[in-house]
Every structure is written in C-alpha cells, then in structure tokens.
Amino acid sequence: MGSLNEGWLRYKALPRNVLSLSLVSLLNDTSSEIIYPLLPAFLALSLGASPFAIGLIEGFAESIASLLKLVSGYLSDKFHSRKLPVFLGYSLAAVTRPFLAFVSTWPQVLVVRMTDRVGKGIRGAPRDALIASSVSKERRGFVFGFNRAADHLGAVFGPIVGFLLLLVFAADTQNPTIHEYQQVFLFASVPVFIGIVVIAFFVREEARPPGAGGEPLNLSLQGFDPNFKRFLVVIAVFTLSNSTDAFLLLRAAESGIAPVVLPLLWVTLHLSKVLFSLFGGDLSDRLGRRTTILIGWLIYALVYLGFALADSAWQCWLLFIMYGAYFGLTEGAEKAFVADMVPEEKRGTAYGLYNLAYGITVFPASLLFGFIWHQYGAPSAFFMSCCISGLAFVFLLTVKQTPSALE
C-alpha cells in the first residue's frame, strides 16, 4: 500500500505545465493517429503509391519537422518564448489535417503531410524545453516518460476512433474506397483543436527578462559539451536504421493482417508504448540514461531482425509489442539525457540540435529502406536496419553514462 501511495503522490505532484502539455500531446496524437494507421494502405491500395513513394512522403515530412526544430528551439531560447511556438505549431496541425479528405494523388498527400510536420517542427523543441525546466534533474526521466506515455495513450484512442469510423463509413472494410478513407480523415482535427484551448489557458511560462533576446543568431555547436556532441553523432547513425513506421504496417499487411485490423495493431503498439514509457523514464532516473537507451536499442535491433524473418500475423503482433518496449525505454531517457548535458538557457537550441541529428538521416533512412525493399525485398531491408542499429549500439558505448549536471 505504501508503494501505491508513493506512486500516486508522484503523479499528483506533477507541475501544471507537465500535466497540461501531456494532455495536449494526448489530444494531438488522438487526432494524428486516426489517420496514420490507415495512411499506408490508403496510399498503396487506393492511390497506387509504391513503397519508395511511401518512404519519400514520410521521410521528407519528418525531415522537415526535425530541421525546423533547430530554428524554433534556438529562437525560443533567444526570445525567452516557449509557449507561443507551441501554440502556433499545434494550430497549424489543426488547420492542415482536414485537407487529407480532399486528396486524390500521393503527391497531394506529400504536401499535406509536409505542412502538418512543419507544425511539429515549430512546437517540438520549445515544448520539450518547457517540460525540462519544470522539474529537477532527478525527476526528468520520470516526467518525460509520463509525457511520452500521454502522447502514446492518444495513439491508442486515435486508431480505435479510426477503426470505428471505418466500420461506419466503409461498405467493404477489407477494401475501402478513396471516399470512405477521406470521410474518416475529415474527423481528425477535432481533438487537436481542443488541445489548442488547453495551451491558451493552462500553459504558463516565466516572463521574459528585460533586455533578453539581443544576442546575434548563432546556431553552431560551439559552447556545448563534447559528450553532447558525440551523442548527436550517435543519434544520427542510429536514425539511419529507423525508417518510417509505415513500412512496419505494410509488412504486417503482407503477413496477412487485414487493412481494417491495422488500427487495432497500432493500438496494441501504443498500449505497449504507454506501459513501457511510464517504466522506462523512471528506470533512466534510477539506472542511468545511457544504460536504459542501450537496452532499448538492443530490443529495436531484435525487432527489425524479427520483421526480416516474419511470415505470419501472430509474429507481427508480438513484434509490435516489442517495438513499443523500445520506444518506452528510449524516448523519455534520450530527452532527459539531453537536458542533463546542457544548461537551462540553451535547452531549446539543444533539443533543436538533437532533432536535427535525427532529421539529417531520417529522410535518407526511409528512402534507402524503400529502395532496398523495392529492389531486393522486405527481408533484406529489415536486416539492413538491424545491422545499422547494432553499429549505433556500439557507438553509444563511447558516450559518458553520467554527464556533469549543468543547472
């Protein structure tokens, strides 16, 4: 009973900004994940997009988001304004997503997805900096794990809503028409509009100090800890193995999972993410950031090896659960690791650089994966990613486990 009470008190004591931004993450991901599990099948089966085109769409969209996080993160440091870019970023997503209801070609989907991800790029680094500044170093892993769990809980709700809407609108759930998919997509912006209201009325930030923001714009790595720079390089290497999850859904469909069931598979993945995010962030506070990330990356390599060998639906279900464990162990730990290595006044820029390291290779990762799949088959593409992630695992051993706290 004592441990239960202690756990409840930890959640009850979470700062207002953490709770508010976690609720916004939940609402935004509910919106996004109504669409995402259906998008690969919609692109491939309804619009005739190839695996290479799917990789192009998702890789380019995520790269745009990652590159913009560097600029938005630095500007949030320079002008001491975190809340405004967070609000603008989520607002752009709310306005953009309904346009998927009117697309008829995959290049149009590319434009919509790219614009949506621009919003993600604007809000991402300032939001993480707000969260990091709300708690002490000793609780950062727990808080980021909680935020990621809320985000993934929205990704549980979203596919369920998408599944129910598809049951309502589709005459043949095994082979929905373009119009039936588009009817589902039209509902996707409602939750994120609610999130915008939460940001406006419940998120707070400290007033900007007089004279702040007069420094010249400088996006270099100068002044950052060498250990942080090494971590960025390792993240870039690992991300070369981390192509869009659309390929995992496509692999699942090839293994016998019907399109109408794909949202339920996506729900299972995110339930796993929720559970392991609550555990993984706290584990990084106790065990250390690097050790927790290493465990997660090892699981990732095994998952991709499993997808290379998978030939039945039940194997895909198991692999998606393991894939959720990878996310839970690494997402919160990586963000807390970044905050540990840099001072508070540079965290917006640091998160921007962290996402830039991701963005440098996420686009070529999806293109390369799609090309290998198209030329040599899915098993070869998944085995390639397994090998690259194993190499990144070795490189991460060169990053210090416990960097000096810079508060």
Image: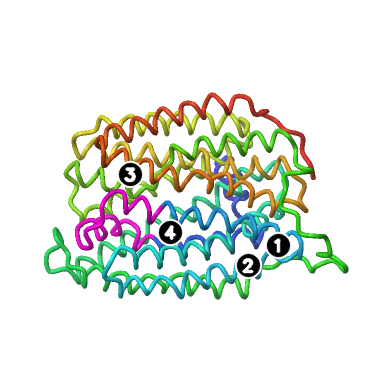
Amino acid on which disc 1 is placed: Leu
Q: Quadrant of the image for the N terminus?
A: top right
Q: Are marks 2 and 1 in contact (CB under 8 Å)?
A: yes
Circles 3, 1 touching at the beta carbon (< 8 Å): no
What amino acid does circle 2 point to? Pro
Residue identified by numbered label 1: 75
Q: Is residue 198 magenta?
A: no
Q: Which residue is mark 2?
A: 85
- Say which label, 3 or 4, has the lower sequence index: 4
**What kind of colouring is applied to the model shown?**
rainbow
Q: Is residue 49 magenta?
A: yes
Cα–Cα gap, marks 3 and 2: 33 Å
The earlier-in-sequence mark between 4 and 1 is: 1
Give the alpha-carbon distance from disc 4 to disc 1, as whole Å.
29 Å
Q: Amino acid at mark 4?
A: Gly
Which amino acid type is marked by label 3? Gly
From the top left corner, tell me how far across and down residue 216 is, in percent: 81, 60
Q: Earlier in the sequence, mark 2 or mark 4?
A: 2
Q: Is residue 375 left or right of residue 63?
A: left
Residue 322 in the image: state x and y as whole percent: 37, 36
Q: Which region of the structure is painted magenta?
A: 33-58
Which disc, if any, is residue 154? 4
Distance, label 2 to label 4, CA atoms, is 22 Å
Can the viewer see residue 13 in this picture? no
